[in-house]
Image (tube, grey):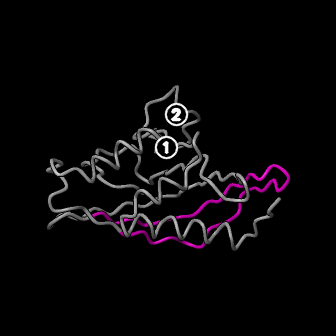
Amino acid sequence: MTTFTDKMLFDFVYAEARMLDEQRFDEWLDLFAEDGWYWMPLEHDQPDPRLHTSLLYEDKLLLKVRIARLAGRRTFSQQPKSRCHHLIQQPTLESADHDKGEYVVRSAFHYVETRQDQQALYAGWATHHLVARDGVLRIKLKKVQLVNCDAAFENIQLFM
């Protein structure tokens, strides 16, 4: 069994953000476990994505559909394509169960999404629930908690 160090876990978070910034969405999707989820709560301290409305709560299949839409030639909201940039604070290890291969890593971020002359800035915290499967880290849950999660937003095109 592989024991993942703090540095390995933090490097995973940085590499994931870089994939998104470089729009390597298929590689990014491969980081998710087959039963992985991407969640953006609508309220602070929202306890459950299934019993409360969320900004996003998507499994791997829905993420794949979103990625296909981003690449589609008839996706006019992406002509020209949106671009993004993640600025991530040094992550912290919130919990680790080396025997089970389960880790929780939290990082604060600033995220910029731009298309043509419009630019949006978001700030928040990402919590990565990671699992080791066959010696490889996978995302079981990525929870993106925005500072102003209860605000009215324009369309968020990409992934934070």
Query: What residue is pinned by disc 2?
Result: 49
Residue closer to the observer: 20 or 93: 20
Instruction: Write down the quadrant of residue 4 in the picture.
Output: bottom right
Residue at image x 33%, y 66%? 84
Is-magenta flag for residue 107?
Answer: yes
Q: How many marks?
A: 2
What segment is highlighted magenta in the picture? 85-113
Amino acid type, residue under disc 2 in the picture: Pro
- Mark 2 crowdedness (10 Å alpha carbons): few <14, some 14-19, many ≥20: some
Is disc 2 in contact with disc 1, using a CB cutoff of under 8 Å?
yes
Outermost residue, front direction? 134
SS type, badge 2 = loop
Residue at image x 57%, y 65%? 13
Instruction: Write down the quadrant of residue 160 in the picture.
Output: bottom left
Outermost residue, right direction? 99
- Mark 1 crowdedness (10 Å alpha carbons): few <14, some 14-19, many ≥20: many
Height in image: 146 above or below 110?
above
Query: What residue is pinned by disc 1?
Result: 39
Instruction: Write down the quadrant of residue 132 in the picture.
Output: bottom right
The disc, 2 or 1, on the residue closer to the chain's N-terminal end is 1
Rendered location of residue 151, percent (x, y): 34, 46
SS type, badge 1 = strand
Q: CA gap, disc 2 to disc 1?
A: 7 Å
The quadrant the N terminus occupies is: bottom right
Amino acid type, residue under disc 1 in the picture: Trp
Rendered location of residue 64, percent (x, y): 40, 45
Rendered location of residue 30, percent (x, y): 51, 54
Rendered location of residue 16, percent (x, y): 51, 64
